Amino acid sequence: MAVMFASCKKDENTTVTPTENLKVPYTTLTSTTNYFETFKGTDGKTTVDFAGQTTRINMLKEIDAYMKKGVTSVISATTLKNMYENKNNPFADATLNSATDKTIVSKTAQSFATVDADAERQRFYGYFTQLEAANNSFAQTAEQGKAGVLDGKYLVNEKGFEYGQFVQKGLIGAMMLDQISNIYMGTEKQAADNNTIVSGKNYTALEHHWDEAYGYLTANEMYPKKDPADATKWLETYLGSYVRQVSTSVGGENAADIYMALLKGRAAIVNKDLTTRDAQIAYVRTSLEKAIAIIAVSYLNKTKTATTDGAKFHSLSEGYGFIYSLRFAYNAKIGKSKSDELLGILSNKANGFWSLTNADIDNVRDQIATAFGINKDVVVNH
C-alpha cells in the first residue's frame, strides 16, 4: 500500500522535493542546451511541437512583405484583411492558405475581454484602411499634409504615420507577447493536464502549452541562435529578435537567461515541479515586458538623432508600435489607458509627427523610463 501511495502521488502535479530523482535535472541545462532534444517521449522523439505558432508568424511575414510593396506598387486593405483572417487564399505560401484553422485575428488581444479584444482588432482593420489610403500616393514624395514616400522607402500618410510599422510592431504585442504572457503562461493553460498523453501525440497538454509559448519567441532549438552561414546575423524574428537585442547592460535581461528560464520551466513541468515552473513564468513575463519598454525608449531616442524626416518618422512609428504593445504585458505597468494617453501625445497634434517637438518625445520617453526604472537615454543597437 505504501508503494501504491507513493506511485499515485508522483502522478499528480505536485512540487518535487530536492531529494527526488528528477527526470530532467536542472543542473544539466545550459544556455547551449538543445530545447528539442532535451524533451523526448517514450518513442524517443521530441515532445516539442509549436507548428501553429510558426504558421502564424509566417503569416505575419507575408503581411509584412506585402505592406512593404506599398512603396512602389498598389496594395489593398482587402488583401490585408484576408491575410489577417486567412480567408480567400491570400498567401503566396499555399500551406498557409490550407491552415484554415489558423488566423492572426483570433490570436490578437485574445486575453482581453470580448468587447476590448474586438476594439483592438478593429484598430488593425483601421490601419489596413489607412495604409491603402496612403498607398494611393506612393508615386509622390510625402510632405506635411500630403501622403507619399520618404527617403524612397517609407510610405507615410499626410501626418507622417508609417502604418506598416504600426501593424508589425503592434502585433508583436497584441499577438506574440499576449499569447506568451497571458494565454499560454496564464492560469487556464497552466492548469492543463500533465499526466495523460494527448491522443495521437507524445506530450501532455501542459507540456504542449509551454512549447506554444516558446514558439512565439523563437522557432529554433536554442535562443538566441546565430546564423550558421553568417556569424554576424541571428535567426530570430519579431519579438525574439528585439528581446535578444536587450541585455543587462541596458537595464534588461540577457537573452541567454530568458532561454534558461524557458528551459527550466519546461523541465519543471516534466518533473511536476510547479513551484519552479511558476518562478520561471514570473521571470519571463517581467523580462519580456521590460525588453519592449527599453526598445520603445530606444526608438524614441533615435528619432532625435535622425538626419531625415523619413528616418525620424520611421523610428517614431516603430516606437509607437512598441508603446502600444506594452498594454499586452501581464499585469502591465503601462496598461491600455496609459498607453493610449502616451500614443495620443505622439499622434494627436494637427499635423501628427510633423508637429512633434523633442520636448513632446521626451515627455513620452521619460514617462516610460520612470515606470520601468530604466535609463531614459538608452539606445539599443537595432
Image (tube, rainbow, N blue to C red):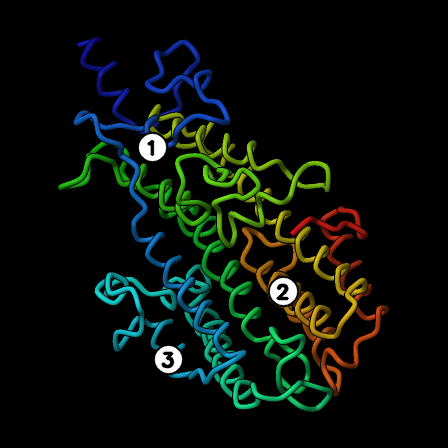
In the figure, is residue 144 to the left or right of 74? right
At 40% from the left and 57% from the top, the residue drawn is 57
At 39% from the left and 35% from the top, the residue drawn is 221
Dot 2: within a 10 Å radius of its alpha carbon, few (fewer than 14), some, or many (20 or more) residues? Answer: many
Quarter of the figure with residue 341: bottom right
Q: Are marks 3 and 1 in contact (CB under 8 Å)?
A: no
At 70% from the left and 68% from the top, the residue drawn is 311
| In this view, 114 is above or below 218 | below
Q: Say which residue label 2 marks.
A: 318
Spatial separation of the CA atoms under disc 2 and disc 3: 23 Å
Q: Say which residue label 1 marks.
A: 36
* Label 3: which secondary element: helix
Viewer-proximal residue among 126 and 90: 90
From the top left corner, tell me how far across and down residue 95 is, in percent. Answer: 24, 61
In the figure, is residue 41 to the left or right of 90? left
Mark closer to the chain start, 3 or 1? 1
* Label 2: which secondary element: helix
Q: Are marks 2 and 3 in contact (CB under 8 Å)?
A: no
Q: Residue furthest right?
A: 359
Question: Three-letter amino acid code at disc 2?
Answer: Glu
Q: Say which residue label 3 marks.
A: 79
Spatial separation of the CA atoms under disc 1 and disc 2: 33 Å
In the figure, is residue 132 to the left or right of 244? left
* Label 1: which secondary element: helix
At 40% from the left and 25% from the top, the residue drawn is 273
Question: Three-letter amino acid code at disc 1?
Answer: Phe
Mark closer to the chain start, 2 or 3? 3
In the figure, is residue 181 to the left or right of 78? right
Question: Three-letter amino acid code at disc 3?
Answer: Thr
Spatial separation of the CA atoms under disc 3 and disc 1: 36 Å
Quarter of the N terminus within the rendering: top left
